[in-house]
Image: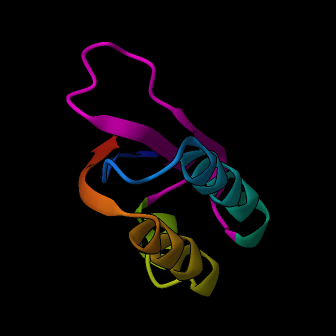
Amino acid sequence: MIDHTVLVKFADTTTQEQLQEVVDRFKALRSHLTGVIDLQAGINFSEKNQGYQVVLYVRFEDRAALEAYGPNPHHQAVAAFIRESGRVDSIVNDIEI
């Protein structure tokens, strides 16, 4: 299994409504992906968040499912919305468990 986690930092001008829309759109991806065991997203409330406001998480069956995820058109649409909403930076972690 592969755990794929993304932390996203947005501009100061990004609203709470936009952050929630990112979370909602990401969660809606589940029905458009193959090889997904779990998919979660939420707004980071930790006081130690280093400015990363949104956490996106997917557990995939294997590396092939992760590789298919990147170019998936539904994923690309969500990624475009994240950029349009003021993405400043992101950190990606992929681990095999």
Q: Nearer the viewer, residue 89 or 85?
A: 85
- In the image, residue 66 sits, relative to residue 37, either above or below, namely below
**Farthest-out residue, top:** 47
Q: Nearer the viewer, residue 21 or 2?
A: 21
**Farthest-out residue, right:** 31
Q: Position of residue 88 (x, y in %)?
A: 24, 59
Report how many numbered discs are placed on residues in the image. Answer: 0
Question: Is 28 placed left or right of 55 in the picture?
Answer: right
At horizontal 64% and vertical 79% (from top left) the residue drawn is 74
- In the image, residue 30 sits, relative to residue 52, either above or below, namely below
* Quarter of the view holding residue 97: top left
What range is drawn magenta here? 33-62
Q: Position of residue 49 (x, y in %)?
A: 28, 25
At horizontal 31% and vertical 13% (from top left) the residue drawn is 47
* Quarter of the view holding residue 44: top left
At horizontal 44% and vertical 41% (from top left) the residue drawn is 54
Q: Position of residue 56 (x, y in %)?
A: 48, 45
